[in-house]
Amino acid sequence: MLQSGEGLRRLSGSRVAVVGAGPGGLATALLLAKAGVHVTLFERETAVGGRTKTVEAPGGYRFDIGPTFFLYPQILAEIFESCGERLEDHVEMRRLDPMYHLLFEGENGLSGEIRATSDEARLQAEIARIAPKDARNLPAFFAENRTKLARFKPVLEQAFDRFLSMVSPAMLTALPHLHPGRSVDRDLRRYFADPRVRLAFSFQTKYLGMSPFRCPSLFTILSFLEYEHGVYHPIGGCGAISEAMAGLARRLGADIRLGAQVERVVFEGKRASGVVVDGETFKADAVVLNGDFAGTIRQLVPESHRPRWRDRKVEKARLSCSTFMMYLGIEGTMPEGLGHHSILLAKDYERNINEITNGTLPMQPSLYVQHAGYTDGGMAPPGHTALYVLVPVPNLKSGIDWEQAQPMYRQLVLDRLKLIGLTDIESRLRYERVLDPRDWRDEFAVHQGATFNLAHDLGQMLWFRPHNRFGQGLYLVGGGTHPGSGLPVIYEGARISTRLLIEDLIGARAPELRELPDTAPLATQGEPS
């Protein structure tokens, strides 16, 4: 086994290529740079962040492209802390209360609403207005999920690159809480009889692009995370986090190259030894891929180097849904009751979800609206409003003709917005951008427009999901690898992949990332690659 000093010298002499500056790629580059590795991050776009970036549109409107909030920012804070920094010194993270406004569609308008808050007493009062008996069960639900999260957190922090990982001590401890035969909705029925209340604790499965009626019961912890740890808005938009990570990574010596198109991974025998970038070969001791798994892996890695994920298996993989997006710049202000996050849940939510799952475009969809200006005045010019509207829809495997459907669906969504009080915005539109599943595929390289990556059913989780250590010298980060999608989970996956990569580089078990020493002066860490 290498001595500590020898291991650190080996790290400082190693070169790693990271492909893609999304959240996972940025976190990995940051952690590797702190460990003393020479990191070069290649990003095909002219800005970092991938879909976690904030863009400025004509007229001074600003929009998050993908994620619009941060859940469980403790992991992100720990990553900054491991690099000797405080997250709050880089970005102001404002906790939202209420977290969001849930509106339940009924036969003739709305059948109820809940202003979700992490204040348990207030939340009980909100639930009691529509379901008094269910409100009494809230403390028991929280208690159970507090235990469930504690048992599963070590599982989500470990790698699953060996089948024996499925019987690790952490996994065996968590198994009694897994209940593989239960869906999220079925699990919630033990506490909440009113379907509207169950939706308040299950719509979060949309973060995984899945149905609460099919999603494994494990993921009741998603709503619990919100209520226990809060929902946060980064001032300036979610892209502020990506920019902060990139800035710190550069300070630690990472070389971030924008507008650099990686064409393929290079191998020497079975081992990844670099990448081809814009026709030039960049040699590296290891390669990290951060991209949409189903598309990126086939484009960059020859089939012979991915025996467990050959083309046929990738094509048959179960995918998440897609989203129909509207980014709207509006002259004037919004109704006083429109908060930061609003979610309209369709009258027949189960039918809505089944239509999406089965490839049918819903004509009575649920939708989500972000009014970031409620909290952050910098997202639109004075006297104007920037609205972000998201509607879950089938991915491109459905065969929907979006060329024909898009204008009709745009109008349908604008009409649906009237249910949450947005009755007059069409005449005040000063900027509009619409994205449908084709745009996710063509502009953002998302396979089949499945915006939440591979589905998170039990057959595509843990060991059955693409591994963080994907091959010799080749590692994955992002929503397509373990632990899965969603920003906190992607950041945890980046920590797992980084730990594995460091262990492989030094040939010995690495110390905990948060305890990695400052291995070299910044001047030497910043040597060109």
Image (cartoon, grey):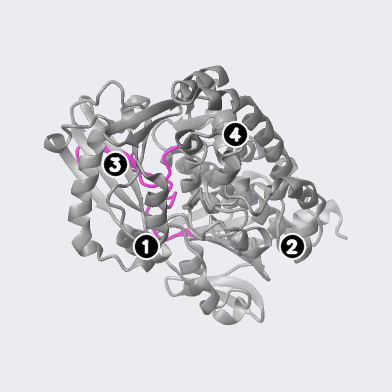
Position of residue 509 relative to residue 242, above or below, is below
Residue topped by disc 3: 56
Distance between the Cα atoms at labels 4 and 3? Answer: 44 Å
Q: Position of residue 35 (x, y in %)?
A: 68, 49
Q: Position of residue 103 (x, y in %)?
A: 36, 32
Residue topped by disc 1: 359
Which circle's residue, 2 or 1, is located before the other in the chain? 1
Circle 4/circle 3 CB separation < 8 Å: no
Distance between the Cα atoms at labels 3 and 1? Answer: 33 Å
The picture quadrant where one finds residue 44 is bottom left
Which residue is at a point 31% across and 53% down the rendered structure image?
A: 362
Circle 1/circle 4 CB separation < 8 Å: no
Q: Say which of 165 and 358 sits in front.
A: 358
- Which quarter of the rendered picture does the C terminus lie within? bottom right
SS category of the residue bearing label 3: strand
Position of residue 29 relative to residue 161, above or below, is above
Which circle's residue, 4 or 3, is located before the other in the chain? 3
Residue topped by disc 2: 504
Between marks 4 and 3 in the image, the one whose residue lies nearer the viewer: 4
Residue topped by disc 4: 191
Query: Pointer 1: residues within 10 angstroms few (<14), some, or many (20+)?
Result: some
- 315 displayed left or right of 324: right
Q: Say which of 189 and 522 sits in front.
A: 189
What residue range appears in magenta?
42-69
- Which quarter of the rendered picture does the N terminus lie within? bottom right
The kind of residue on which mark 4 rests is Tyr
Distance between the Cα atoms at labels 2 and 3? Answer: 41 Å
Query: Pointer 4: residues within 10 angstroms few (<14), some, or many (20+)?
Result: some
- Whether residue 61 appears in magenta in the rendering, the answer is yes
The kind of residue on which mark 1 rests is Gly
- Whether residue 41 appears in magenta in the rendering, the answer is no
Between marks 2 and 1 in the image, the one whose residue lies nearer the viewer: 1
